[in-house]
Amino acid sequence: MDEERVREIAAAAGLDKLTDKQLTEFAAAIASGRALAEMLPKDLHWSEESALVFRLPMPARSAR
């Protein structure tokens, strides 16, 4: 991936102040993520896919 495309992706994610070294690491992370995604099975039924779980933190109790 060329440097200009990496800068566009970073800017779209709000990362417009990355150094050249950080941009190189960002590009490596993008490539790694794509490689891992390519290894995932493509023939899973929707019911076989893992569920994403998101939990909100418990609110802090106020001292009375």
Image (cartoon, grey):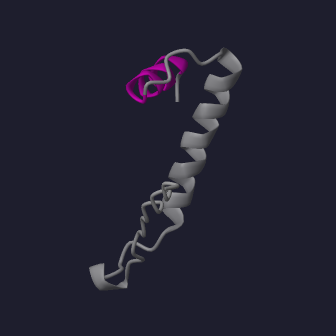
Residue 32 sits above or below residue 57 on the image = above
Residue at 54% in and 50% down: 33
The number of discs equals 0
Residue situated furthest left in the rendering: 46
Q: Is 50 positioned to the left or the right of 6 in the image?
A: left
Where residue 28 sits, quadrant-wise, is top right
Where residue 12 sits, quadrant-wise, is top left
Q: Residue 35's x, y, as percent? A: 56, 54
Where residue 56 sits, quadrant-wise, is bottom left
Q: Residue 25's x, y, as percent? A: 67, 32
Residue at 49% in and 20% down: 7
> Magenta region: which residues?
3-13
Residue situated furthest right in the rendering: 21
Q: Residue 44's x, y, as percent? A: 36, 80
Q: Is 46 positioned to the left or the right of 53 in the image?
A: left
Magenta: main secondary structure equals: helix
Residue 45 sits above or below residue 62 on the image = below
**Is 12 in front, or is 39?**
12
Residue situated furthest front in the rendering: 64
Per the image, is 39 magenta? no
Residue 52 sits above or below residue 11 on the image = below
Q: Residue 29's x, y, as percent? A: 60, 41
Residue at 52% in and 55% down: 63
